[in-house]
Amino acid sequence: MSYSSIYIGRSSKVPVPLTIFVLIAILVFLARFLSSNPPASKATDKKIEKLKILNLTHSSATVVWQSQKKETGYVFYSNDPAKIDRVALDERDIPEKKQPFMNHYVSIGGLTGGTTYFYKIISDNELVTRDKNKPFSFKTPQPAQTISQTRPAYGKVIHPNGDPQEDALVVFQIQGAMPLGVLTKGTGEWLVPLASILDAKNQESKSIGPTDSVNIDITTENGESSKILTTISRVSPIPQTVIIGKNYDFITHRKRKKRRISGSI
């Protein structure tokens, strides 16, 4: 016998219309609640691509991933793997309205240094975890002991017709360091601070020099991409405006230019 049958049988004095009204009210409330906070209690076979942790510091991190099509996405996280209940939205979202994207960019703040955090991804209202429903994880470093004086890296991305490229994901990878990243603005411009660079192996502060190589991957919401190979000495700004869909090698180009100059002397 169901719980509802026992309850109704023992409450025969309650008028039937009132009982029906209460049940309907409960159902309406649940429907509204679940529509604004979609359930995602079990793992699915849903796939995501290019999952990365960017901009890692002792107090913050950015989770980025790519879905196979434009869809909503956000993250549940916690330092307790048994209670992953804190929510972080895509930077472009507001709680009342989650927008569909292909490149998802979720920043998490208020973290504690030297702590492991666990997280699960909600993409298109489906739960995404590691194998066997295990959460993903990352560890925050201890507060940085040194701050780099290197100027920020910045540049601009446009369409072939000259229009600015908005919401493109820029992943900035210095050789041997933890990756950084940002989204392009409505003007197509982007800026990545280089004040705190972490070593990819031990998460300690990493010193960088003008000849250190840099790989920059830019991906749009439509799947178009550009790759840039350069050095720290040529990122403030990037030597030229990037036309999405084209690749750039400023290291080889500079070496060829130097050889031409030395050969003409």
Image (cartoon, grey):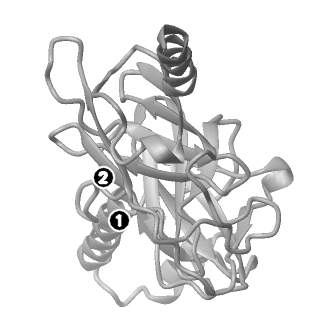
In this orientation, does residue 124 appear?
no
**Residue at 30% from the left image edge and 52% from the top image edge:** 98
For this view, does 166 lie left or right of residue 136? left
Query: Which mark is in front, 1 or 2?
Result: 2
Q: Quadrant of residue 246?
A: top left
**Residue at 44% from the left image edge and 32% from the top image edge:** 218
The amino acid type found where label 1 is placed reads Leu
Classify 54 as above or below 112.
above
Q: How many marks?
A: 2
Q: Earlier in the sequence, mark 1 or mark 2?
A: 1
| Percent of width and height locating residue 90 | 38, 56
Graded by Cα atoms within 10 Å as few (under 14), some (14 to 19) or many (20 or more), the crowding at tag 2 reads: some
Which element type, helix, strand or loop, lies under badge 2?
loop
Q: Nearer the viewer, residue 94 or 112?
A: 112
Q: Nearer the viewer, residue 236 or 118?
A: 236
| Percent of width and height locating residue 128 | 65, 48
**Residue at 44% from the left image edge and 30% from the top image edge:** 219
Mark 1, residue position: 27
Graded by Cα atoms within 10 Å as few (under 14), some (14 to 19) or many (20 or more), the crowding at tag 1 reads: few
Q: Nearer the viewer, residue 176 or 160?
A: 176
For this view, does 233 lie left or right of residue 53? left
Tell me the CA gap for discs 1 and 2: 24 Å
Classify 84 as above or below 208.
below
For this view, does 30 lie left or right of residue 57? left
Q: Quadrant of residue 178?
A: bottom right
| Percent of width and height locating residue 215 | 58, 36
Mark 2, residue position: 98
In this orientation, does residue 62 appear?
yes
The amino acid type found where label 2 is placed reads Lys
Which element type, helix, strand or loop, lies under badge 1?
helix
**Residue at 48% from the left image edge and 9% from the top image edge:** 264
